[in-house]
Image: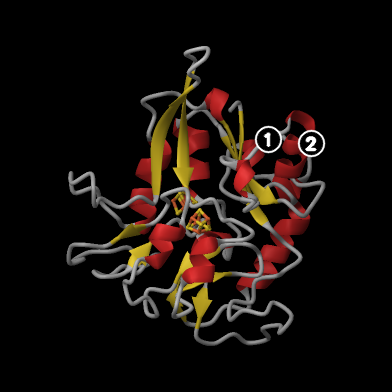
Amino acid sequence: MSSDPREQGCARNGGDTPCNPTRRRMLAAGAGLLGLSVAPGVFLMQAGATSDAGTATGASPRVRWGLLIDTTRCAEGCDACVRACREENGWAHLGQAPTDAQWIRKVTVSDPDTGHSQSLPVMCQHCAHPPCVQVCPTGASMQRADGIVQVDKHLCIGCRYCMMACPYKARSFVHEPVTEFSPNSPRGKGTVESCHLCVHRIDRGQLPACVTRCASEGGGAMVFGDLNDPDSDISQALSRHGGRAIRQDLGLNPGVRYQGI
Ligand code: SF4
Ligand code: SF4
């Protein structure tokens, strides 16, 4: 347990917030800027929003949010992260695999040479150079200054260009009428959706739902934090043990990194 009173209740001590107090103060300050939200991380009004972000979100370009997943702690059959995401963001699996929502899914990869297989979660990889954003004709696919990639469903016309452009198959199309949804993540038939890194929680200074649940019910395989901050837990873990992106060869520089693959 950290002796720093500012770290009590943080992820390292079983809580729900990041452990870097500097970052938490920054997040708390950011939360004070929030106005009326039309979509997670997209605000109609922002008192005191800075213009250097270059977006309508107030996110800081000094920060780059990322996720590090230690696949050696990720058990096959564990779906704690998937359940957490579903509950937090109000999507459901309707039992129709080709069209079901794909915010986060567990996949098993095998090495053909050794036969070793590994289970891991795949969600939007929050690419630094996201092809989904580049092909979107309306600006609905957007990247915040802090690296979070998301869809504004109010601008989405359902053309699905972004789905074709995403090499990670991280996006899905809402085929069915939506009768219930979480206020955290407005959804609508005829629009595309994907993991937004729980931007509504991040902007409140909380960890993404999957990270919190993985720590309490799963193997504690996920670390969230600021890739730009060399002192953050995620940067420290990456410098100590390394980490790589899925399909690193594509050069998209994802914010989601993996260990053990
Ligand atoms: S993983 Fe796919 S949806 Fe996410 S930023 Fe990259 S290209 Fe876009
Ligand atoms: S960060 Fe949030 S939206 Fe993304 S996979 Fe995890 S729970 Fe789902």
Query: As rendered, which of 73 and 167 lies closer to the eye?
Result: 167
Q: Is residue 100 visible?
A: yes
Number of callouts: 2
Q: Is residue 2 visible?
A: no
Position of residue 254 relative to residue 50, above or below, is above
State the image coordinates of residue 254 (x, y, percent, origin top left). 61, 50
- The amino acid type of the residue labelled 2 equals Ser
Q: Secondary structure at mark 1?
A: loop
Q: Quadrant of residue 243?
A: top right
Q: Quadrant of residue 260?
A: top right
Query: As rendered, which of 100 and 180 lies closer to the eye?
Result: 100
Q: Is residue 23 left or right of residue 111?
A: right
State the image coordinates of residue 223 (x, y, percent, origin top left). 62, 41
Query: As rendered, which of 84 and 193 lies closer to the eye?
Result: 193
The disc placed on residue 39 is none
Q: Residue at x 73, y 37 (%)?
A: 238
- The local crowd at label 2, few if under 14, some if 14 to 19, many if 20 or more residues have their Cα within 10 Å, is few
- The amino acid type of the residue labelled 1 equals Gly
Residue position marked by numbered label 1 in the rendering: 243
Q: Is residue 37 left or right of residue 249?
A: left
Residue position marked by numbered label 2 in the rendering: 239
User: Mark 2 or mark 1, which is nearer to you?
Assistant: 1
- The local crowd at label 1, few if under 14, some if 14 to 19, many if 20 or more residues have their Cα within 10 Å, is some
